Amino acid sequence: MALASLPLLLLLVYCGSSRALELVPSDQKILEKSEGDKVTLECKYNVGPMDIGTLDIDWDLVSADTQKPDQSIIMFSGGVTYVNSEELKNRVHFSSPDPSDGDASIEIVNLKSTDTGSYQCKVKKVPGMKSRKIALSVYLKPAKPRCFIEGSQQIGKDLSLKCESKEGTPPVTYQWFKLTGQQPRPPGLNWDPASGTLPVKNASQYHSGTYRCLANNRVGSEECMLILNVVPPSNVAGVVAGAIIGTLLSLGLVGLLVFFCCKKQREKKYEKEVQHEIREDVAPPKSRNSTARSYIGSNHSSLGSLSPSNIDGYSKARYNQVPSEEHERPQSQTPNFVPPKYHGLTVV
């Protein structure tokens, strides 16, 4: 009887020991975090007096492909911690300094989008074994958006308020808020949450004010602000006329500068030409007196035959007929002239 009841007793002991290892209930099933944050994946457990085997804790990244094995990330066995993932090296560790005290939770810091996946915690202590899966999604929160205005900020014109965020895991949605102005929410302010565009039709001064745009997704948000100032139309004709006058004045000034520069160049060129024409070896022109004397000397022989009575008239007539310099003889060919004396008179 005692021998017959022994297997039943052993079976009861085994069943009781297998139920002794239990994981503490947790609400963590799906987690969503943003890049750069940290996360704690909970896995706490309890053991009973019948759990006498070696404690092994293993965290795996479950493969999306059922045909491929799961990837071991970190494990605790024989009182030693092992990090098996190169991708998470220096970024993953057990939350407790001693995982054997009932806390097998791990912490991952500086999260990346590549950390997205399903993580499984397995706690083994012979004869029991328990496991739990936690889905982790890592998103990129929106970058700080840029707020700007497209269109003319004049009364009666159409314009658009724009809000753009260059980064962020989709879907990224946008919201506009009017913070100041004569009306808290002017009529017709309906924006597109997907594009972040807020159109303003037939703008008026009621639309003026400070606006705030909020870009957000499931893990975070960022904002930007702008000031809209709707003003009356400007004097376009006056602006155009002023621009034309300014252009003409500029062209006139440029023309004057070109004229004076050209004039200066011509003056310099003329001075150079005059300097080249002047030669130092050219003799100066002879006077008319020397020409007259040469002419009188050449006609000495004819004067010698004249009588005193007609010498005065002849000399005056001949002297007035001074030849031009084209017929002048060289000085070397002119004989020396000695005026004759006639009855006390000297012809000069």
Image (cartoon, grey):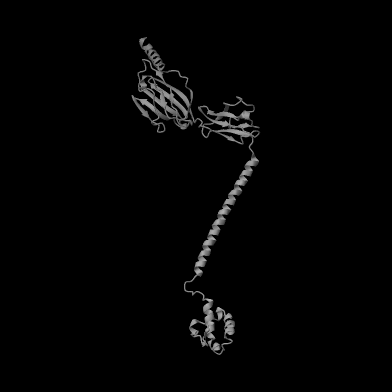
Q: Residue at x 52, y 63 (%)?
A: 269
Residue, far left: 79
Q: Residue at x 53, y 79 (%)?
A: 291
Which quadrant, please, contains the N terminus?
top left
Q: Position of residue 55 (x, y in %)?
A: 36, 22
How many marks overall?
0
Is 308 placed left or right of 107 in the picture? right
- Is residue 189 shown to the viewer in this render? no
Q: Position of residue 209 (x, y in %)?
A: 58, 29
- Depth check, front residue: 132 or 4: 132
Q: Position of residue 233 (x, y in %)?
A: 64, 36
Is the residue 260 above or below the residue 53 in the image?
below
- Is residue 314 shown to the viewer in this render? yes
Residue, far top: 1
Q: Residue at x 55, y 56 (%)?
A: 260
Is 82 placed left or right of 65 in the picture? left
- Depth check, front residue: 342 or 165: 342
Is 277 placed left or right of 158 in the picture? left
- Depth check, front residue: 172 or 307: 307
- Depth check, front residue: 107 or 191: 191
Q: Residue at x 50, y 68 (%)?
A: 276
Residue, far bottom: 305
Q: Position of residue 44 (x, y in %)?
A: 41, 20
User: Looking at the rendering, which quadrant does residue 76 occupy?
Assistant: top left
Is the residue 236 above or below the residue 249 in the image?
above
Is 178 placed left or right of 22 in the picture? right
Is the residue 57 above or below the residue 11 in the image?
below
Is the residue 288 above or below the residue 161 in the image?
below
